[in-house]
Image (cartoon, rainbow, N blue to C red):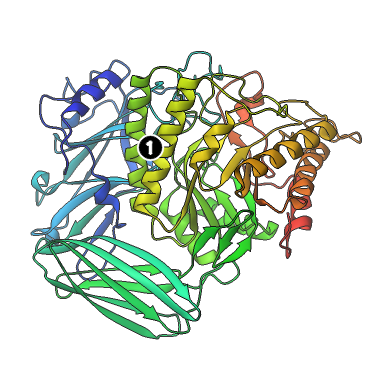
């Protein structure tokens, strides 16, 4: 584990009390391999009913709550506390979780880890009263080696201190002066759900030697495919083996010879079966340290690239048809709900969609596993929403450090999924100027210092992504009115546009003309493909109008149809992602009836609006928008 002494100061500034001891900051390398049960490894899922108590005065640590909570209430893990516990919907302060469990005696002698797949936002973990580590950021896993803290033949107490206060220097940020003016005061348009949102697991790794990381990179030439397998291990092992098996039982074997803790093998596959949206073919990959450890995963052989007009999957142009999404659902909040995940895929397939963006944060790991099997393409997005570049260089540095950390976590976890085709390092970085304004035919300039910081920092994140993973594209998603020069840093251009809704409301003829001229200018200037990553209109279910008035179901169909029709006329528009797949929870605001964003083509409970049926008629069985 890497130690972060400065993290003590940061945590104190952000409101979590810490003991006067070394606090381990979670190491992104620990989450590269999802816990797996096999002959060498064990997994125990700790999801279920935990004990819960709020700590609004932040006295829990000084009063020793990690040694046993009192005055608790039941809470489901995974799940957000906001919609489970009465009176806590808008509570973003400190709270404590606790559960007790035996560690199986058969695990004695192994290395024992505790993994949280997502806790929002700042968390500190205790085992049997001892602090084992801290993690900043929601939406991504973190894990700690808890072997020294485990007791045998009696229950182990696991305590977690969680806090989700809104702060301008977090990602995503909140309490930003002059921002969206919602309650709670987010700088982003979704609700800041709090708590342990995904599964919690105890797992073991073999003590003698264990696999730490596996990276798969694929390519093909003609009918021959190549899978490059890079392996990192820990402990005493000088050799290993890679076994790749096709669905038909064909086997390819390569030996690993370690130099230090790293080894690499290139496996050639004759008559390779490529992975695609129409045929999501997967190979099984097994990596072994014989007699010591093994790990299995899957691999799709495919390539991703681009030319001046298209994203190319296996060298062929592809059009992305799909959505931006959110994970929230009634009662669960942002807690993972696998039945909802499965149903969402069924609905997207019913529509004829082939892709989505994980707006605005990485999703649960099972979402990617299903996408690999079903042939969906994913834009994988970091939780860096509304980044600021105009509030001072020191503040920018603080946020950039957390962005780098989250990017490393995201790529470590998701790098082997064939479904992931693009890393999005930010959504709608804020612009001090006229954010959301109409395009007027002129280049948006912005202030020189803001432009410098934006280009340097967004460019650094994209370069880091490309450095860690040169096999995928990388970019960021821009809002209306942001300076045009920011687009120089990405492989392709991704833009969110709402002409006809937030500007020129209801004037679709004007909106489409503005959008058409702007798209032409962007492509002429930068000569790269463009994805429209957001466009949409709020819609009240059951509201109808024969004149296609705003908020009616007819207007939503008109709005989406007009945007899609325009995209079909622009051969350089390589993707259209509608905002949003389903209605979702937001903070309270004048423009958010019931604290909801109603731009979904499905309701929050997944009932179709007219627009869903319209999209099915357009998309199903075609390759057009």
Q: In the rendered image, which quarter contains the N terminus?
A: top left
Q: Is residue 373 left or right of residue 286?
A: right
Q: Is residue 578 visible?
A: no
State the image quarter where residue 234 is shown: bottom left
**Which residue is disc 1 drawn over?**
138
Image vertical order of residue 133 relative to residue 379, above or below: above
Image vertical order of residue 453 relative to residue 159, above or below: above
Q: Residue at x 15, y 37 (%)?
A: 3
Residue 245 on image: x %, y %: 37, 80
The residue positioned farthest toward the right in the image shown: 546
Q: In the rendered image, which quarter contains the C terminus?
A: bottom right
Residue 401 on image: x %, y %: 32, 32
Q: Is residue 448 left or right of residue 13?
A: right
Q: Residue at x 23, y 55 (%)?
A: 203
Query: Judging from the image, what secondary structure is the residue with disc 1 in?
Result: loop
Q: Is residue 613 visible?
A: yes
Residue nearest the viewer, comparing 242 with 17: 242
Residue nearest the viewer, comparing 414 with 296: 414
Residue 622 on image: x %, y %: 74, 63
Question: How many C-alpha atoms fall within 10 Å of the one at disc 1: few (<14), some, or many (≥20)?
Answer: many
């Amino acid at each position: 584990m890497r130690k972060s002494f400065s993290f003590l100061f940061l945590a104190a500034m952000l409101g979590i009390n810490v003991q006067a001891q070394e606090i381990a900051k979670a190491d992104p390398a620990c989450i590269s391999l999802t816990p797996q049960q096999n002959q060498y490894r064990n997994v125990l899922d700790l999801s279920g009913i935990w004990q819960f108590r709020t700590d609004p005065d932040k006295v829990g640590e000084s009063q020793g709550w990690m040694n046993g909570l009192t005055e608790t209430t039941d809470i489901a893990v995974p799940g957000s506390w906001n919609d489970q516990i009465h009176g806590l919907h808008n509570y973003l302060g400190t709270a404590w979780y606790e559960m007790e469990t035996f560690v199986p005696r058969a695990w004695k002698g192994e290395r024992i880890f505790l993994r949280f797949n997502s806790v929002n936002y700042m968390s500190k973990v205790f085992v049997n009263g001892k602090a084992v580590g801290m993690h900043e950021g929601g939406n991504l896993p973190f894990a700690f080696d808890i072997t020294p803290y485990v007791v045998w033949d009696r229950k182990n107490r696991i305590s977690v201190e969680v806090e989700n206060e809104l702060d301008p220097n977090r990602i995503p940020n909140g309490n930003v002066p002059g921002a969206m003016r919602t309650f709670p005061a987010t700088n982003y348009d979704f609700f800041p759900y709090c708590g342990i949102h995904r599964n919690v697991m105890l797992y073991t790794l073999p003590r003698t030697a264990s696999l730490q990381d596996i990276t798969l990179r694929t390519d093909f030439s003609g009918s021959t495919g190549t899978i490059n397998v890079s392996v990192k291990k820990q402990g005493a092992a000088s050799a290993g083996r890679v076994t790749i098996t096709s669905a038909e039982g064909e086997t390819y074997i390569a030996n690993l010879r370690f130099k230090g803790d790293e080894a690499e093998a290139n496996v050639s596959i004759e008559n390779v079966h490529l992975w695609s949206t129409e045929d999501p073919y997967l190979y099984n990959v097994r990596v072994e340290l014989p007699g010591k450890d093994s790990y299995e995963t899957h691999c799709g052989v495919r390539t991703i690239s681009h030319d001046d007009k298209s994203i190319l999957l296996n060298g062929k142009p592809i059009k992305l048809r799909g959505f931006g999404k959110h994970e929230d659902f009634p009662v669960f909040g942002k807690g993972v709900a696998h039945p909802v995940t499965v149903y969402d895929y069924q609905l997207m397939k019913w529509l004829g969609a082939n892709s989505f963006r994980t707006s605005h944060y990485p999703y649960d790991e099972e979402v990617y596993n299903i996408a690999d099997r079903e042939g969906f393409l994913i834009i994988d997005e970091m939780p860096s929403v509304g980044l600021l570049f105009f509030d001072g260089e020191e503040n920018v540095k603080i946020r950039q450090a957390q962005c780098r950390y989250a990017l490393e976590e995201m790529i470590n976890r998701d790098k082997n999924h064939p479904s992931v085709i693009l890393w999005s390092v930010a959504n709608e970085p804020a612009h001090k100027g006229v954010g959301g304004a109409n395009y007027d035919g002129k280049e948006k300039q912005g202030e020189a210092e803001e432009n410098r910081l934006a280009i340097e920092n967004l460019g650094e994140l994209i370069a880091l992504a490309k450095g860690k993973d040169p096999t995928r594209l990388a970019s960021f998603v821009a809002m209306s009115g942001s300076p045009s020069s920011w687009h120089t840093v990405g492989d392709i251009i991704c833009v969110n546009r709402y002409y006809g809704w937030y500007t020129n409301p209801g004037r679709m003829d004007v909106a489409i003309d503005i959008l058409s001229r702007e798209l032409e200018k962007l492509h002429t200037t930068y000569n790269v493909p463009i994805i429209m990553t957001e466009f949409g209109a709020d819609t009240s279910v059951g509201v109808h109008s024969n004149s296609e008035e705003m908020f009616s179901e007819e207007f939503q169909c008109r709005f989406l149809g007009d945007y899609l029709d325009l995209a079909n006329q622009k051969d350089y528009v390589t993707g259209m992602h509608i905002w949003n797949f389903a209605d979702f929870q937001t903070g309270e605001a004048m423009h958010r009836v019931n604290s909801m964003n109603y731009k979904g083509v499905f309701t929050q409970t997944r009932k179709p609006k007219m627009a869903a049926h319209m999209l099915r008629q357009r998309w199903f069985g075609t390759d057009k928008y």
